[in-house]
Image (tube, rainbow, N blue to C red):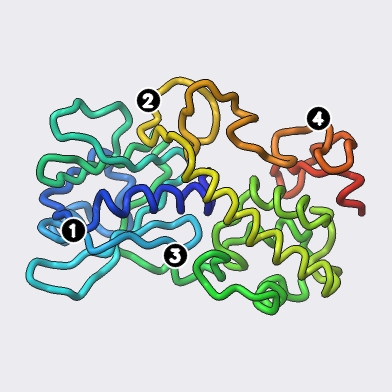
Amino acid sequence: MPELPEVEVLRRHLHPLLSGKTLCELRVLKLRVVRPESTKRLTATVKGCRVMGIDRRGKFLWLNLAKPRSQQTFPLVIHLGMTGRLFVQPDAVKLPSHVAAVFRLDQELLVFKDTRSFGRITLETDSIERLGPDPLVDDFLVGDLRSALGQSAQPVKVRLMDQRVMAGLGNIYACEVLHRAGISPFMKSLDLSPAKLKQLHAAIISTLARQVKFGMGLDLDFMGETKGDGLFYFGSRHGQSRKAMERFRVYMRSGEPCGVCGSMIERAELANRGTFFCPKCQPG
């Protein structure tokens, strides 16, 4: 599932392509992606609106739309789900398979492709309002992290992945930031010392910012038509292997040496998710 860096890279890619464009028409090909409102209401509401910009919080994107002759905006929220892709293509080009919805922008199309149909397009903002702080959007301080984690006995990795605690971290980056901070994913949140909280805060900010910068420097295939592996935000960069592209510290690297200490990275199950860690760098 795409996490904060993937969605932020996509936002930065789409912002200049969509800002100022008019949504002439919306066609919904997979009805289940529009919820809870009806497809009829959604299509009628956004038709003729102008895109004033694109914002993000956690894993959610939204288009800031304005009615004709109005500067007052309202959000059209898009969640990519597990397999969603959002990209612009010429109107004359044939649509790919698994398209869930298509916005017509004069001579171009904004295409929402979703193979497994877990994504969502909605006017509702309740999901965004329930999110915790976003490390790259908000003024996110160590005290905010301490308040978010609270006095919970949950393992710190599980707590970090709760979107009500912090918006944007999923399984991949929870593993990555904990390794960078030298914290065991199994440690109880309430056992984190002030020093460890400070290290974790720094690791969250630096890891997410680094991955966004790295993703922006790649030759991306947002349509996902090029064959190959790798997470969608890196798309397909010709001539590069998955490992070279992603540069993960521990994620999906079980049995490989840790880049810090040389110990073998291990994998365990935690809250039904594969958890990757270095037993020496992350003791306990």
Q: CA distance from mark 3 to mark 2?
A: 30 Å
Residue in the foreground of this view, choosing between 88 and 241: 241
Q: Residue at x 23, y 38 (%)?
A: 29
Q: Residue at x 58, y 67 (%)?
A: 164
Of the numbered discs in the image, which one, if any, rests on residue 20?
1
Q: For the residue labelled by badge 2, is the local secondary structure a helix, a strand or a loop?
A: loop
Task: Give the mark, 1 or 2, whose residue is nearer the N terminus.
Answer: 1
Read off the residue under disc 2: 225
Question: Where residue 42 appears, x then y in whole percent?
Answer: 21, 57
Task: Give the mark, 1 or 3, whose residue is nearer the N terminus.
Answer: 1
The amino acid marked with disc number 1 is Gly
Q: Residues within 10 Å of mark 2 (few under 14, many from 20)?
A: few
Q: For the residue labelled by badge 1, is the local secondary structure a helix, a strand or a loop?
A: loop
Q: Residue at x 82, y 71 (%)?
A: 190
Please identify the quadrant where the C terminus is shown: bottom right
Residue in the foreground of this view, choosing between 113 and 255: 255
Read off the residue under disc 3: 127
Q: For the residue labelled by badge 3, is the local secondary structure a helix, a strand or a loop?
A: helix
Of the numbered discs in the image, which one, if any, rests on residue 256?
4
